[in-house]
Amino acid sequence: MNHVAVLDFGSQYTQLIVRRVRELGYFAKLYLPEHLDAIGKPGAIILSGGPKSTSDEDAPDIDFDLLKRYKVPVLGVCYGMQLLNIKFGGSVKKSNHREYGQAGLFPVEQSGLYAEISKESQVWMSHSDTVDSLGDDCTVIAKNQHGTPVSLQWGDTFFGIQFHPEVTHSHEGTQILKNFLDVAGELAPFHIEDFKQELIDGIRERVGQKQVVCGVSGGVDSTVLAVLLHEAGVNVKAIYVDQGLMRKNETEEVKKNFKRMGVPIQVVDASERFLTALAGEGDPEKKRKIIGNMFIDVFWDAVGDAEMLAQGTLYPDVIESASNENSKASTIKTHHNRVDRILEMQKEGKVLEPLAELFKDEVRELGANMGIQQDILDRHPFPGPGLAVRCPGVVTKERLDIIRDCDDIFISELKESGWYQKTWQAYAGLIPVKTVGVKGDERSYEYATNLRAVISEDAMTADWVDLPTPLLRKVSSRILNEVSGINRVLYDISSKPPASIEWE
């Protein structure tokens, strides 16, 4: 049985396609378009979207003759559809405005690619070009609310869609992908147990007898990685660095959790080093790079002769950083584990990132398969740079203490009310602007805190949680009465996109 090959033209959502295919039970792998000749024997091929225009001089291309020789169903998404239309003899023109966000989908017929799809469905658009003239043997199979073609078909096995079926905002996108894969017939299955063994085999092959340093934060990603390395039986030393940017009582909780799992860790208190290095720096990209490079320094100071560094990097970290030199994606932000020093180590073969093709929910599933307790796996994501990305501008101990106290109240109330389990991620941050208020009949001039709670499946897209007003009122009251330095509490109701989940 053959896998599904996804060709990456640079969309921020490309790996979501892989994930959706896996959710449907099929094995999918990601490739660069120029590696089309190295995808083996695929059962289906998907061309992703991308940030480029097909009219750009450096627009990504594809070997169309080779693509056709595979004789398998092909689906072009956004940029992929426009490219297919050109290859089939059609044309694409620049639109007067970028179409971004929700749109209506109206299938011409509720069959084939649109079998079991509603007569009117919501999809998510993100493009600046539009189809002008249609190519040979082309049929319009769906339009938007304005009557503009947004889905095409060439012959029996080539399809194109001008929207993103992989994002949750496209309400029936997964069904559309399923309909496409049904055209392919029998495909290779995907099971997390099989993938776990593949990861373990790969780790053993890469590591051999070398010593590996694994940085752990207590979060799901690094915890699963540490247990995976432990299960693989390699020579690993897990190190937890308290960089002074952790949540309230974080270090003690992490030590207890790893003791429960039977994985020894070494705790390093480097808070003074990190805060000194960050002193006076307010640029978010520079802050991330300082933290990332300092992590490496601390690790190597702690173990000296370690030969490899293992990281719990997930695919959203990779795609948002666009750190691969061959990547066609635009950089959104540099993640702490994609800084220059780590990239240099990657070139030397010293970085191990077994989870880099997985999303958070897949990592949780992997952890459960290895017997990690559910309360550990259910912990909300916590960014590698810690509270530094929840403190816009300059990081100081005073600001961090305020964030810790606000966050502790917010999270404790979410857990008490049962809303912690209903949210993907929640936190309190700091808005580093002081405003006038009144406390105890006196004028106050203090900071505001921002509360954020989102729902998501994979961190690539997210929506804010409509928390009950009584809960928000209680959290606000406690923060205003218990946290010194805060006189305003704001609730963030921004989705991703256009906002990110973290503030920096």
Image (cartoon, helix red, strand yellow):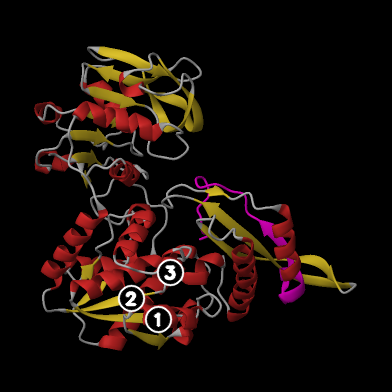
Give x and y (percent) for residue 138. Answer: 27, 14
Q: Callout 3: few (<14), some (14-19), or many (20+) C-alpha neighbours within 10 Å?
A: many
Given contact means CB atoms under 8 Å apart, are the residues at marks 1 and 3 in contact? no
Which of the two labelled residues, at mark 2 and mark 1, occupies the earlier sequence position?
2
Label 2 vs label 1: CA separation? 8 Å
Q: Mark 3: which secondary structure?
A: helix
Main SS, magenta residues: loop
| Residue sitting nearer the eye, 23 or 408 | 23
Given contact means CB atoms under 8 Å apart, are the residues at marks 2 and 1 in contact? yes
User: Residue 4: in sight, yes or no?
Assistant: yes
Circle 3 residue: 376
Q: Image point 19% across, 30% down: which residue?
A: 185
Disc number placed over residue 241 in the picture, else none: 1
Label 2 vs label 3: CA separation? 17 Å
Label 1 vs label 3: CA separation? 18 Å
Q: Mark 1: which secondary structure?
A: strand
Give x and y (percent) for residue 158. Answer: 23, 23
Q: Would you place residue 439 above or below residue 397 in this image?
A: above
Disc number placed over residue 92 in the picture, else none: none
Indicate whether residue 503 is drawn in magenta: yes
User: Residue 78: in sight, yes or no?
Assistant: no
